[in-house]
């Protein structure tokens, strides 16, 4: 549309302005268009389910990711799809929607300073032989879980009583994490010594990839957890990683989530958030040790 109120071919602007909102209108990418009102309904739905504040700038992302689901079910508009998932009659599809809208990029040893602190400060002070438990509370496809596991294996040994719990709201990423299969182009940040020591080379259908070794995987467990709801029985942890997820929450949701997770810490336990995140103003229960690293007083 040009600034004169007409399209480039001279057609009245009114015809162009109304057509994208027509039922079943299709954009150039092959997906139906979505109106602001329809997008707002999805924003409210994902906030209600997961506590995630989906920014207005994410409309293109939503259309791109959920457009595939419309095609899968033979639906012609996002209004139809919203009714389909919001009805409560299709819990599997609702989970598929959550999976598509909450999946995030991660890699091994992301924000490496946290793992150096884990190894050189926390584990260096841990009494030998005592159990050590870590929770990766937004574990995505598992790189964080296994990075933590490598650090614990190096510091405590594979025979020591330690465990890493990985959780996510997305069942799709949890399935990938539990499988522990990654392509070699995913080794960004992973030291070659750990790759040789704690991973197995893929063969046949897994050629070009690597598997996390069984000796590491036996120290891990995976659970679907919605941080925006009352938590299941998880036990207590020495360290909780909650990294790069709170940036999607509003302030009140952050306070509620942090309060839930702090209840799962042992006295003296540590709470670690992403480098773009802070607990300032969210809790007075934890004391800051350094930016992004906090401790529950013993």
Image (spheres, rainbow, N blue to C red):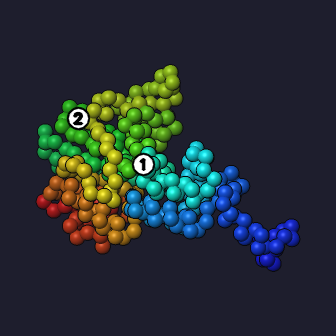
Counting from the top left corner in percent of width and height, residue 155 is at: 24, 40
Instruction: Let me know if residue 191 appears in the view.
Output: no
Q: Where residue 60 sits in the image (x, y, percent)?
A: 60, 59
In-image side of 128 versus 143 (left or right)? left
Residue depicted at x 57% and y 59%: 79
Q: Pointer 2: what residue?
A: 157
Determine the residue positioned at 35% across, 66% down.
Answer: 253
Which one is closest to the eye, mark 1 or mark 2? 1
Furthest-bottom residue in view? 4
Comparing 274 with 57, the one in front is: 57
Front residue of this view, candidates 12 and 149: 12
Give the total of numbered labels: 2
- N-terminal label among 1 and 2: 1
Residue 190: mark = none
Q: Residue at x 25, y 50 (%)?
A: 232
Q: Secondary structure at mark 2?
A: loop
* Left or right for 260, reference 69: left
Camera-nearest residue between 278 and 123: 278
Q: Local crowd at mark 2 within 10 Å, few (<14), some, or many (≥20)?
A: few
Q: Determine whether the residue tagged by mark 1 lies in a helix, strand or loop.
A: helix
Q: Which residue is mark 1?
A: 91
Asked whether residue 206 appears in the rendered view, the answer is: yes
Residue furthest right as drawn: 10
Q: Is residue 55 above or below residue 222?
A: below
| Quadrant of the snapshot with the C terminus | bottom left
Q: Residue at x 13, y 45 (%)?
A: 127
The one nearer the camera, 48 or 185, is: 48
For label 1, the crowd category at 10 Å Cα-Cα, with few meaning under 14, some 14 to 19 and many 20 or more, is: few
Tell me residue 239's x, y (percent): 24, 52
* Residue 97: image location, x then y, percent: 48, 51
Distance from Cα at disc 1 to Cα at disc 2: 42 Å
């Amino acid at each position: 549309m040009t600034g004169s109120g007409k399209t480039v071919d001279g057609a009245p602007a009114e015809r162009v302005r109304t057509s994208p909102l027509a039922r079943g209108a299709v954009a150039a990418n092959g997906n139906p268009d979505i109106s602001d009102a329809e997008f707002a309904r999805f924003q409210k739905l994902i906030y209600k389910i997961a506590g995630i504040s989906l920014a207005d700038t994410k409309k293109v992302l939503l259309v791109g990711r959920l457009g595939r689901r419309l095609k899968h079910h033979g639906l012609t508009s996002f209004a139809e799809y919203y009714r389909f998932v919001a009805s409560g009659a299709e819990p599997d599809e609702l989970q598929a929607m959550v999976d598509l809208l909450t999946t995030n990029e991660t890699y091994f040893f992301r924000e490496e300073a946290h793992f150096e602190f884990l190894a050189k400060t926390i584990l260096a002070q841990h009494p030998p032989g005592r159990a050590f438990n870590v929770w990766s509370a937004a574990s995505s496809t598992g790189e964080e879980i296994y990075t933590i596991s490598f650090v614990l294996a190096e510091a405590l040994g594979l025979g020591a009583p330690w465990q890493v719990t990985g959780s996510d709201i997305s069942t799709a990423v949890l399935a990938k994490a539990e499988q522990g299969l990654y392509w070699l182009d995913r080794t960004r940040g992973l030291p070659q010594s750990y790759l040789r020591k704690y991973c197995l080379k893929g063969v046949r259908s897994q050629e070009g990839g690597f598997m996390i070794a069984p000796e590491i995987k036996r120290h891990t467990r995976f659970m679907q957890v919605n941080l925006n709801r009352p938590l299941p029985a998880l036990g207590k942890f020495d360290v909780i990683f909650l990294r790069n997820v709170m940036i999607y929450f509003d302030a009140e949701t952050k306070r509620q989530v942090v309060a839930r997770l702090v209840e799962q810490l042992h006295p003296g336990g540590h709470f670690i958030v992403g480098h773009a995140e802070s607990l300032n103003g969210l809790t007075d229960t934890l004391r800051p040790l350094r930016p992004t690293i906090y401790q529950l007083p013993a």
